Amino acid sequence: MSPTRPAASGGVAAVLLAAGGGSRFGGGGHKLLAPLDGRPLVAWALRSAVAAALDAVVVVTGAVPLDELVADVAGDRAVVVRNDLWRDGQAGSLQAGIAWCATRGMDAAVVGLGDQPLVGAAAWRAVADAAWAPVVTATFGGRRRPPVRLARAVWPLLPREGDDGARVLMKQRPDLVGEVTCSGDPVDVDTRDDLDRAKGDPAGEH
């Protein structure tokens, strides 16, 4: 993996949302820790976020502790922010990540999901580099999916409650939104069937 540059005033941070309860996954442990091709599910998304070599990487956790996993995968190239109100929905986790970015003086945040193991570093990087619109979303096969780049100017417009994140802003203000075509597969692993479908993806994609 490419090293992440030290955080400083300005720059673009990767924000990986990994706080939800994963209730649709069923019994047998949290989905983010479920094994996928030899690694915990969330490790794939984290590896991609780190390999994109943005200015910082922050992982927002909640339902399950991930500090040890993050340290094992990313060393000191990622930090963990805990959202104790994760049960209230994704908006709170997004706000927690954005608050971290704001205190570090970041210019933008690229927000992705911990349960998207097949979105590679190239997608994170392409979205991060697309600074020509206040909100820029990746598209995969014509479908808008995370990661999404959020410029500092739009952070006050993001929802503060509920189970939707940047999607709310994109619906309300389509005039602010641009798109970047990306490679990879944006599948969310919500169920065990989703996990089975994700198995066998070439490691080189990450």
Image (cartoon, helix red, strand yellow):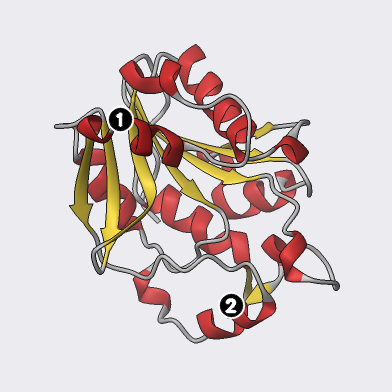
Residue 75 location, quadrant: top right
Q: Between 151 and 54, which is closer to the camera in this rendering? A: 151
Q: Earlier in the sequence, mark 1 or mark 2?
A: 1
Task: Left or right? Give the position of 131 relative to 90.
Answer: left
Per the image, the residue denoted by label 2 is 194
Asked if residue 192 is positioned above or below residue 48 in the image, the reply reads: below
What's the residue type where badge 2 is placed? Asp
Tags 1 and 2 touching, CB below 8 Å: no
Task: Give the residue furthest to the front.
Answer: 172
For mark 1, does the 10 Å Cα neighbourhood hold few (<14), some (14 to 19), or many (20 or more) residues? few
Q: Between 122 and 91, which is closer to the camera in this rendering? A: 91
Asked if residue 64 is positioned above or below residue 190 in the image, the reply reads: above
Estimate the x, y position of residue 190 in percent, counting from the top left: 63, 67
Q: How far apart are marks 1 and 2 (CA)?
A: 31 Å
For mark 2, does the 10 Å Cα neighbourhood hold few (<14), some (14 to 19), or many (20 or more) residues? few
Per the image, the residue denoted by label 1 is 173
Estimate the x, y position of residue 10 in percent, counting from the top left: 32, 17
Residue 205 location, quadrant: bottom left
Visible in this render: residue 128?
A: yes
Residue 62's tag is none
**Secondary structure category for the residue under label 2:** helix
Task: Give the residue furthest to the left.
Answer: 132
Residue 121 location, quadrant: bottom left
Q: Between 93 and 126, which is closer to the camera in this rendering? A: 93
